Amino acid sequence: MSDMTSAPPQSTLALQLRRFRQNRLAMAGLVVLGLIVLACFLGPYAFPFTGEDADFTAIALPVDLLSAHPFGTDNFGRDLLVRTLEGGQVSLAIGFVGAFTAGVIGVLYGAVAGYIGGRIDGLMMRMVEILYGFPYVILVILLSLLFGGGNIALFAAIVFTLWLTPAVIVRAQAQALARREFIEAARAGGMRTGQIILTHIVPNTLSVVIVYGSLLVPEVILSESFLSFLGIGIKEPQASWGNLIQAGTSAMSTDLRLLLLPGGLLATVLFCLNFIADGLRDAFDPNER
């Protein structure tokens, strides 16, 4: 009789990663997103000029893939491709860093409220409800004016308005976890409230947070683009996809190229992020299939 050895059982995380890798749209979105991120952060170094350098001898050049300006220039002689890639750096950085920051704030706030409960939970969630009651755009404009404008003000305003939903989601998870036996055992073992929240509550909400976080990134990118489009976000001469699209729409009747490149990249990134979010949702919650 031959020896038979059984394979060790896979961990939950390994099974979730395998399910994610089996999602072709999610993997394709991840690859395309990675290529766009690399192009945005490394591509401008391939050119001897920046997106803010104006060449008044090469104004409004058309697309010529064999020239020094392969996608042409704008009405100020600035290279459209380099300017779009540099704008992508701003939009992607605000999107990913903003989503991470808003997620961390929301997770900690919701975990504390849900675990402690009682009056503290009531007060904390009343604050969330009050902030939910303000119109989003008006709140961001007020915060941007309060912080004095600029990139940091825009970032702070977006983060301040987008941590609310993660807080509500994690609070519900924390309330359920607070009644579990292993939490009771931790309390009986003498662990302090802060230790329980950081070592037990937060880690056990990560699967939900990861799925929602993947949806938060495109929301932050869209918020930045929308505010820059309105003229209260990233200001000229610095580029972002939002103000590039705004400039492209104003010249849409005469030069559609100015709109297509930044708009196409933004749309592609949003599609990729949505495919990745769907893949993560299916991987972490297979019942959603």
Image: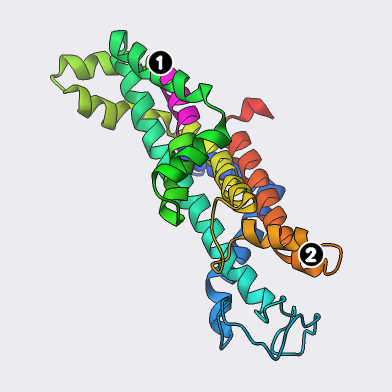
Q: Is residue 257 left or right of residue 234?
A: right
Q: Position of residue 99 (x, y in %)?
A: 48, 44
Find out whether residue 170 is within the magenta segment: yes
Please tell me which residue is depicted at 52% across the width and 61% down the height of the picture: 90
Viewer-nearest residue: 106 or 227: 227
Q: From which residue to which does the magenta span run? A: 163-172
Task: Say which of marks 2 and 1 sits in front.
Answer: 2
Rendered view: 173 above or below 1: above
- In the drawing, what numbered circle is on residue 251? 2
CA gap between label 2 and label 1 equals: 46 Å
Viewer-nearest residue: 277 or 148: 148
- Helix, strand or loop status at disc 2: loop
Q: Is residue 279 left or right of residue 94?
A: right
Q: What amino acid is labelled 1 in the image?
A: Arg
Please tell me which residue is depicted at 72% across the width and 53% down the height of the picture: 267
Q: Is residue 230 left or right of residue 120?
A: right
The picture quadrant where one finds residue 275 is top right
